[in-house]
Image (cartoon, coloured by chain):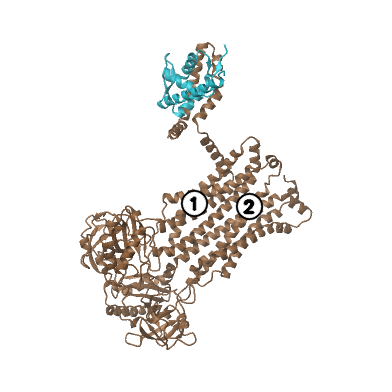
Chain colours: A cyan, B brown
Amino acid sequence: MGRTEIPPGTLYMLILRSLARSGPQHGYGIAQHIQQVTNDVLQVEEGSLYPALQRMLVKGWVTAEWSQSENNRRARYYKLTPAGRKQLSVEVSEFEKVTAAIRKAIAPA
Amino acid sequence: MRWLAETWRKLLMIARRDQLERDLEEEMQDHVARKAAELGDPHAARRALGNSTRLREESREAWAWMWIERLIQDLRYAFRVLTNSPGFTAVALLTVALATAGCVTVYSFIDALFLRSLNVEHADRLVRMYGTGKNSVNSEVSYAEYTHIRDHITALDSVTAHYSTAPLYVNINGEAGELSGAVVSSRYFPTLGLKPALGRFFSPEEDSVPDRDAVAVIGYGLWRSRFGGDPAVTGRSLRINGKTFQVIGVAPEDFGGVLLGQTPNQVWIPLMMVRTGYRWCDALSEDCHLLSIHGRLASGKTVSEARSEMEGLLRQVWNPSASDSWHIPLVLEPATGIRPRDQRSAQTLARLLAITAGMLLVIACANLGGLLLARGTARAKEIAMRISLGASRLRILRQLLTESILLAALGGALGLVLSRWTSQLLMGFYRRDAEGYGRFYDLRLDPQVVIFAAAVSLGAGVLFGLLPALLASRGNTGDTLRSSGAGSGVRSRLRAVLVAAQVALSLTLLVGAGLLARSGSNLENQSSFDVHHVVAARLRPRLMSYSPAKAQVFLREVVNRLNGIGEVESVTFTSGLGLVWGPGGQNTLSLPADLPADPQRPSRVSYQEVAPRFFETLRIGILQGREFDGHDVAGAQQVAVVNESLARRLWPYSSALEKVIVFAKRPYRVVGVARDSMLYSADSSATPMVFVPFWQDSTQVDARMAIRVRGDAESAIPEIKRTISSIDPDVPITELMPMIGQVRGHFADVRLAGAVLLSTSLLAVLLSALGLYGVIAFVAARRTREVGIRMALGARPGEVVAMFLKQGLALLVVGGIAGLVLALATTRMLKAWLYGISASDPVAFSAGIAVLGFTAVLASWIPARRAARIDPMAALRSD
C-alpha cells in the first residue's frame, strides 16, 4: 500500500500533537504514534524526526531526558513544555486556516 | 525576549556539544534496535532511518550557531595568515597601536581637563561661578557680593565660597613646608555632599566671626602621612602661616578640593580665617575680589536661570569704585573640568593635540590601507583560486574583513597598553610649573576611554580593510589565475594616492615640529635675557606677618649674606610674578606735559619693581643711561627705567633719558632704557614696560630673588637655602629652583606641543617612508621582466635606478606640494607658541622639506637599486 509523504512544514505539528496526546515519548515512540493515529496513511521518514527534535529543543518547545523505558532499556524521552503547547495551538490554527482555504479553492463550483 | 532565551539555550548547547553528539548517537541506535526488533531485520531498520551522516549533520546545524562557527573558522584562518607573514603583521600592528595610543592619550587628556566632574554626590547639579576680570588675580567676587548672592539666590539650593589656590605654609610637629590649602565657607562640604572620614566639618558658628575660630579640616593623605593615621587626630594642632589651628576633621580619601588638575588641597580652614591664608588684600573687605562660588542647582532650575539671577544680584551690590573688574557677563556653568580660566589656554593645546593625533590616525590608516592593498595584490591568486573552487565572494570578503578587524583589535589593545606610557610622558611636562607646582591631570583609563580606543582602531580596521577586500574579491578569476599575479592598476594607483597623502601630512607635521623646536630653543637661548646659571627663590615674609619695615631689613640682610658666598656673582629681586617672562603688575601711565586724549582714562602699562643689579643679573641690556643702584631708595628722587618699546612709543624722535613720566599718579624721571626682555609670541607684540626701584616702595614685603652663580645653578641651591634660613628659619622659601626650570615650567605648553609634534612627525615620516618603499618595491617587482629586457638591450644599472627613483620623486613632489600648502595654511594655529620666529619661518620649512626629501629618496632608492641589481637572464626567465 502506497503511503503519502507528510505535507511540508507539518512535521513539528505532528510531533507536538503526538507528545501532547501521549505524554513524554522517545523518538521511536513518536514515529510509531504518528503512523498509528493516521492509520499508516502518513509516512514520516523516521530519521528526519531527529534533526527536527534538535531544532525544537533549541526553540524550547520540548525538553529531553534519559530514563528507563518499558522494557528496561534506556531511552531519551521528549516532553512538551508550556511554550511547546502554545506553539501547537498556533500551528494547528495556521494549518486549519490553510486547509480551509485550499478546500475552498478546490471545491467544485 | 524569545530570541534571548533561544540564544542562551544555544550557548548551553555549544558548551555541551559532545554530550549532545553522544545522546543523538545513542538514541538513533536505540531507534534502529527497536525497529529491528519489530521488523526482524537490522538492515531494513537502518534503511528506514535514512542517511545517518546527513541526519547528524542536520542536527548539528540545529545546535550550532553557524555564524559563530564560521567566525571562529575565519579567525583561526586569519590568525594563521597573520603569523605567516610576521613582517607585514608587525608593521600593521604597530601602525594601528601607535595611532590608537596617540588618539587615546589625547582623548584622556581632553577627558581629564574638560569632561571630568568632581567625584561628589550628584555632580551634575553642581555649578560654579567665576569672575571674568582681566587680571588673573583678584578678579572673582568680594565677600559682600558672596553673602548677597548666598542670602538671596533662589535658583541655587546651597551656595559656598572658597579661595582654593592658596599655598599655605604649614608646620606640623616642627616640620614645616608648603601645602596646598583652601579657605572655605561652612557650606562648602555640605554643598558638595561630602561626609568626613573622621571628626566633623565646619559649623556655621565657626564661620561667623573673623579671625576667631582657628580650626582646620585636613586631607586624608595628610592625615595618613603626617599624623600617622592617628584616630585621635581631632584636637591635635598644626601651625598655618604662623598661627596655631586645631584639627577638627579629616576629609574623605579621594577628595582634594574643587580645582581639578591643581595640586590637591590638603588643608581647609574657615572663610572667616581667610586673613591667615591670604595676605595680599583683606579678603573680607569690599575691594578684595578673591572668592569663587560653587552651588547646587535647586530642583527644576537650569544653569541659565541661575546665571541670570546671579547677574541681577551682582548688579545690585556691585561697587564700581571698589572694583576694576566687572563680572558681567559672568561665568556660571556646570562644575566640569578644570577652571574656566585655565581652560582657555588648555583649549589651544587640546585642539593642537587633537589635530595632531587625528593626522597620525589618518597617516596610520593610509599606511594600513596601503599594506592591505599590497597584500590583496599578493594574494590575488589565492583568492581567485578559492573563488573558482566555489567560495562565495561574500565569504571571501568576510574572510578578508575578519583579517583586518583582527589586526585592528590586536593593534588597538596594544595601543591601549602603549597609551598608559604615552600618557605618562605627556604628564611629565606638567611636573613643575613656573612656581614649582605640578599639575594633576588624571589620565586614567575609564570605560569611555576604552570604548573610544575600540572605536578608533576597529573603525580604522574596517574602513581600510573593506576597500582592499572589495577589490580583492572582485575581478575575473580566470584572468588573475592566468596572469603573473601582479594585480590591478586600480590598486597601485590607490596606493600611490595613499602614499602621497602620507607624504603631505608628514611634511605638515614636520614643519610644525620644526617651528616649535626653534621656538623652544629660542625660549631658553635668546639675546634678551639669560637665565642660565641663575637660581630663583621666592621669599614670603608676608606669610609670617612681617611688617614692611621688618621685611625690608630682612631682605637687605639676605642680599648681603648671599653676596658673601663665593659662588654667587650677583643678587637681585623683584616684587612681582614672573621675573622675566611675564609682566608684573599693571598701573596707569601718562606724560605730564602732553594732554592725553582722555585724561580720565590714562593708558595702563605693565611694571615691575626691581632691586639694584636686576638688569646685570639677568643680562638684560641697558641701551641708554643706567640701572638702579643703592642710591635709589625711599626719599630720593623717584626714578624709572623704561624698555625700548615704551621709549619708542612715548618719544619716537628723541631720547627717553631725563624725561618725566607720570606712573601710578606719581612723577618719575627716566634714568635708563632697557632692551625689551619680555618674551612675546608670533601672535602678540612687545609689551611696553616700566621698571621702578623696589627700595623706593616702602610697602613691599615679599620678593622673588634671582641669584646668578658662577657654576651650576642646581648645585648652588643648598648653600643658598642654608644662608637665607640662617637669618630667619621661619620665613618660607618657595619656588627655589634653577631659573631655567621656571622658564621651562612657564612655557610647558610650548615644550609639550613641540615634543608631541616632533615624535608624531618622525613617526609619520617613518610610516610614509615605509609606504613609499612598498610602492616602489612593488612597481619594481612588477616590472622585473621589463627591466631584464632593458638591461639585456644595454641599459646601465644607473638608468634603471633612475627609472624607479623618478616614480618615488613624483610621489614626493606631489605629496610635498600638497603638504607645503597644508603647512602654510595650518602653522598659523601655532602662532601663540612661536617665540622669536614667524609662522612661515623659512628655516623650519626647509628643514622639514630636507628631512622628508632625504627619507623619501632613500626609501625609493633602496628598492630601485635592488631592481637594477638583478641578473637580466634570471629576470627574463622569471614567471
Find disc 1 in the rendering and name its residue: B415
Q: x, y (%) of residue B516?
A: 51, 66
- Image-quadrant location for residue B314: bottom left
Task: Decide: is A63 above or below B146.
Answer: above
Q: x, y (%) of residue B873?
A: 76, 49
How many discs appear? Answer: 2
Q: Chain of mark 2?
A: B
Depth check: B568 or B640 in front? Answer: B640
Question: Badge 2 local density, few (<14 within 10 Å), some, or many (20+)?
Answer: many
Q: Which marked residue is nearer to the observer: mark 1 or mark 2?
A: 2
Q: Earlier in the sequence, mark 1 or mark 2?
A: 1
Residue ID at (24%, 68%): B243
- Amino acid type at image mark 2: Arg
Numbered label attached to residue B495: 2
Q: Is residue A45 visible?
A: yes
Tag 1, which secondary structure?
A: helix
Q: Chain of mark 1?
A: B
